[in-house]
Amino acid sequence: MRTLLKIGLAIAAAVLVTAAVAAAAQPRNEEAAPTAPSDTRFQVRITDEMIRHSRINDVLYFVGAAWSLGALVLLLATGASRRMRDVAARMARRPFLVAMLNIALFTIAMAILEFPLTWYSGFVVPHQFDLTNQSFASWMGDMLKGMAVAIALGTVIGAGALLIIRRVRRWWFALWLASIPLIVLLVIVQPIVLDPIFNRFEPLRDAVLRQQLLDLASRAGIEGSRVYQVDKSKQTNTMNAYVNGVGPTNRIVMWDTLLAKMTRDEILGVMGHEMGHYVMKHIWKGLAFSVAASFFVLLAAQTIHDRGLRRFGPRWGLGSPGDPASVPWLLIVAGGVSFFLSPVFSGYSRYVEHQADVFALELTHLNEPLATSFVKFAEDSKVDPSPHPFIRFWRYSHPPIAERIPFALSYKPWERGEPNQAWNP
């Protein structure tokens, strides 16, 4: 147990040191920020509340990783994971069913252990900064729905993974191969099966705007496009739009908050960005990137997992590879590797988001409306437009707003007779 605690404390210390750096790095560095436009329409009104909200979220990101790690260590160190396996074994005989029951118990235990931080970050902080009007009962209902979905999917997928680990020597490679069709399947079904559990999706009601978007989509090379609106206002006051799904389930989705707060041209600029993701096949490229990254994550995970299990498994009450009680150890290893690869995922995401900005500007020529939409995004969600370079490097999935606004205003290759980079008319 001491060895397990040392491992957990070492990883937690690394995560918390990173969090401390994040907290210390948060004060603004005006000299490093891009030059702000002189026109006040394109300047984000930076408030102390905005900076404080950003600092809290940055620290919560790293503390949350350490908290989850601590919960996993606790389940192993106290023998709770072993006891959950024994309870599951008394309830079922077949190994696959034992694994499913164990994972269900584990999911509930982790939800309880993580609830204080989940409640603070997901309910208290948004209310503190007036980013939501959702009641606790409604919020709790969403949490319970999420846990039910996690149990329904996780028990089957997790039990299958444990079966592979138990029977295949190089299980990392078998899991990697099995994950490819599984990831694609989940991406396909998410818009039509999972998302409607939490919100109501419907075709865009505004007939004029819908026709403008269809015309824009046709110019972008998208035929038979599907544009939906979703009732996110019942959960948040912030704005967003996104593309998800693949093939027959591919769709562009706008939050009703965005429709209420943005002008027609701002919406067209934002949706030009989302159409860029579609045309440039960013969903497929993102899947390929995730599959490639998981290859290395799983390879490293088996190496560390098996060595740790051989050396310390008897102390933790764990049997051979594939023991359901080893789930916390598996997640400690895989989660630790993935956490320290976060900058890689963030960097790739920023790259494709910038590509989508380029596409939107080339498609619409709505430079100023896109810039003002960025101002609204920052002020509405109370996010620091100029984060410290370390924060940007580690966790920003989009280029900071202070970079996107000047780019939106200045990028006009058509005025200089230069070719487009992303959109091909």
Image: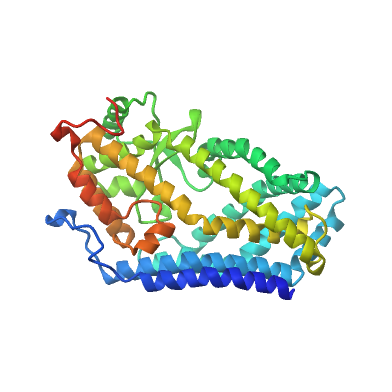
What residue is shown at x 29% (from left), y 57% (from top)?
378
Residue in front for this viewpoint, 136 or 166: 166
Q: Name the residue: 75% across, 56% down.
A: 102
**Farthest left residue in view:** 38
- Please say if 367 is above or below 2: above
Q: Where does residue 74 sit, x and y in percent of width and height? A: 68, 71
Q: How is the image coloured?
A: rainbow
- x, y percentage for residue 205? 34, 36
Residue nearer the viewer, 395 or 50: 395
Query: Is any part of residue 255 visible from this angle?
Result: no
Q: Is residue 9 visible?
A: yes
Residue 253 occupies which quadrant of the picture? top left
Q: Residue at left 41%, top 64%?
A: 126
x and y percentages locating residue 101 in the rendered image: 76, 53
Query: Which quadrant holds residue 229?
Result: top left
Residue at figure coordinates x 14%, y 57% from the top left: 40
Which one is nearer the viewer's eye here, 404 or 189?
A: 404
Is 403 above or below relative to 413?
A: below
Labels in figure, total = 0
Which quarter shows the N terminus? Answer: bottom right
Q: Position of residue 209 (x, y in %)?
A: 27, 34
- Horizontal side of 356 relative to 85 (left or right) equals left
Nearer to us in this view, 178 or 418: 418
Direction bottom: furthest residue? 2
